[in-house]
Amino acid sequence: MARIVILGAGISGHTAARYLSKWVGAQHEIVVVSPNAKWNWIPSNIWVGVGQMTEEDVTFDLAEVYGKTSVDFRQAKGISINPEGRAESAQPFVTVEYTLPSKAGVQENITYDYLINATGPKLNFGATEGLGPEHGHTVSVCTAGHALEANEKLQAIIDALRAGESRTLVIGTGHGMCTCQGAAFEYIYNVDHVLREAGVRDKARIVWLSNEYELGDFGMGGIHIKRGGYFTSGKTFAESLMVERGIEWITRAHVKKVEAGKIHYEMLDGSFHEQEFDFAMLIPPFAGVGLKAYNKAGEDITAQVFLPNGFMKVDADYTPRPYIEWSANDWPRTYQTPAYRNIFAVGIAFAPPHLISKPMQSANGTPINPAPPRTGMPSAAMAKAVAESIRDMLNGADKPTHTASMAEMGAACVASTGSHVFKGTAATMTVFPVVPDYEKYPAYGRDMDLTFGEIGLAGHWMKYFLHHTFLYQAKMRPGWSILPD
Amino acid sequence: MPKVSNREPYQQAYYPPSPTGITRFMRTCFLWQIVRFVAINLKMLKLMAKSHH
C-alpha cells in the first residue's frame, strides 16, 4: 500500500483528492493536509462581497466530505519537505503543524510515496504597505471571511450614499506584480450593480486601478475575439463595459503604499500619483506559502526545489530568455518536479517559467506587469492530470502518463455583472490556449473559434449553474465524477 | 452657469464603443439568451474536450 499526501485542499488539491480517492482509495492511502477546515468555492466570493450570498453558500466542511471517503484529512499546514528522508530512513516525509484547535501547534512528520503540492498562494498583503484587511486599509475577496468583511464595509458606504453623501470606491490590484485581475474585474461590476439596485449609483465614483498595461490583459497578454466582422482586442470590450457603467480606469499602476483614505501609486512612465478613496478592494500579490525543503543530511535545499518567490519548480523550462523568444514549450506538461519523480506541484503552487504578459518596468525600475493566472479551470485540469499520472504510476507506469500544459488547455471565465434571473448579465470569456502558441496560431496565438467573449443573461445563468454544479461536485454527491471539471 | 451645447472630446470615455439599443435589448432578451446559453455550453464543452490530454 502506498501513501499519497496532498498539501492543500483548494480547487486543485481537492480535485486531486477526489479523483485519487475514487480511483485508488480502496488500495492506497490518501492523506489531505489543509490548514482550513472549510472548502471555499472562491469564484462565488464575489457575491459574498456584495451581500448576495452568505459564507455558508460558498463553503462546506472538508472533514464531513472526506469522512464519506477513504481520505484521511488532517487540518494542518505544511512546514517542510524531506524528499530524501533522513539519515536513518530514506522514506520521504513532510512536516506539518496542526491548525485544528484541539491539536494547534503540534508538529508531525507524515511519510509519503507520492506528494502533491497544491498549497495555493500566500496572500502577500505585506508586499505593499497598508494593503489588506488585517493590517491595512483595504478589503479583499480572496477568502470567504474577507468577502464578508468587504460586504460589511460596502453596506456602510451604501448607507452613506443613501444619506446623500458622495463616496469614491477603488477596485483593482494592490501591487505591480498581482494576478487575479478577473476577480477584481468581476467585483467592480457587482459593486456597480448593487449601487444601482440601491438607487445610489449617481453619488458614487467608481475607479478601476490595475497593473495591466491595458484593460482586458488579465495576465494573459490580453485576447482577441471575432466581433462585427473584425478580430478585435479584448481591451475594446473591457473599456466599453467600463464606459457603459460610468467607471473610470487607471492602468499601468503599481500601488506603493496605502494610507487611510489614500492610495499612493507609481505609473509605468515613472510618475507618482495619489488616489483618494472611501472604500478600496485591492487584490494582493501572491507568493509561495514558504515551504522549506531539506536533504538526507538535513541541509536546506529549498533553493533547489523552489524558485525565490516560493513556487515549486516542475517540468517547465526555466532558462531566462527575452520575451520575443518565449514559447508555448516553456510551460510544464506533467507538473512533476525535475529532481524527485514522486513530487508534483499544481495550481498556484507550481512555478511558471515566466510571465504570459510582456514584462514591463517603470522608468524607476519597478516591475509593473500582471503575473500569470493559474486558478479555476486550469488548476482543476492540471490536478486531474496529475491524479491520473499517479494512478498509472502506482499501477506500474514509469513516468507521468497525462499532461495538462497551460499552452494546450483552455479556460473559461464567467464574470458576473449583475445577479438576477431575468435582468442579470455576465461577461462570458473563453480562451484557448491560456498561454498563446504563436507556432500553432500565428496571428493571435489562440484558436479564434474557441476564444470568444460576449455579455448577456445567458452568462449569468452559466455562472449560477456553475456555482451549484461545482459545489455539488466538490461535495462528492452522487454522480460527481461524470460532471465536467 | 453657461449652457452646455457640445460634448468634451479626447476623454477616456470618448473612444470605446457603446452598445446600441438593440445590442442592450438582446443581452437580456429571454429567447435569444436561451439560444446563447446552448451555444456557450457547447463551446465550453468543446474547449474542455480539447483541454484534456
Image (spheres, helix red, strand yellow):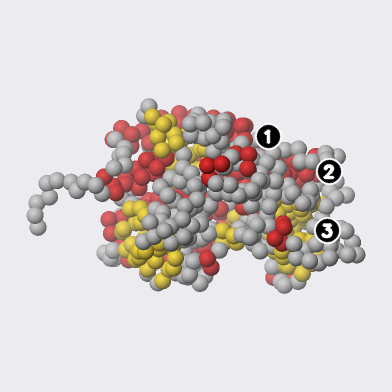
> How many numbered discs sit on the rendered protein?
3
Q: Going by the picture, which residue comes out furthest to the left?
A: B2
> Chain under label 3?
A
Amino acid type, label 3: Glu
The reply to whether discs 1 and 2 touch (Cβ–Cβ < 8 Å) is: no
Which residue is drawn at the image coordinates 67% and 49% (left, top)? A346
Give x and y (percent) for residue A139.
47, 64
Amino acid type, label 1: His
Which residue is drawn at the image coordinates 59% and 60% (left, top)? A287
Q: What secondary structure is found at the residue carrying circle 1?
A: loop
Q: Is residue A415 left or right of residue A89?
A: left
Q: Is residue A346 left or right of residue A149?
A: right
Write down the residue under mark 1: B53
Q: CA distance from mark 3 to mark 1?
A: 31 Å
Which residue is drawn at the image coordinates 31% and 39% (left, top)? B17
Q: Nearer the viewer, residue A213 or A318?
A: A318
Amino acid type, label 2: Leu
Write down the residue under mark 2: A394
Q: What secondary structure is found at the residue carrying circle 3?
A: loop
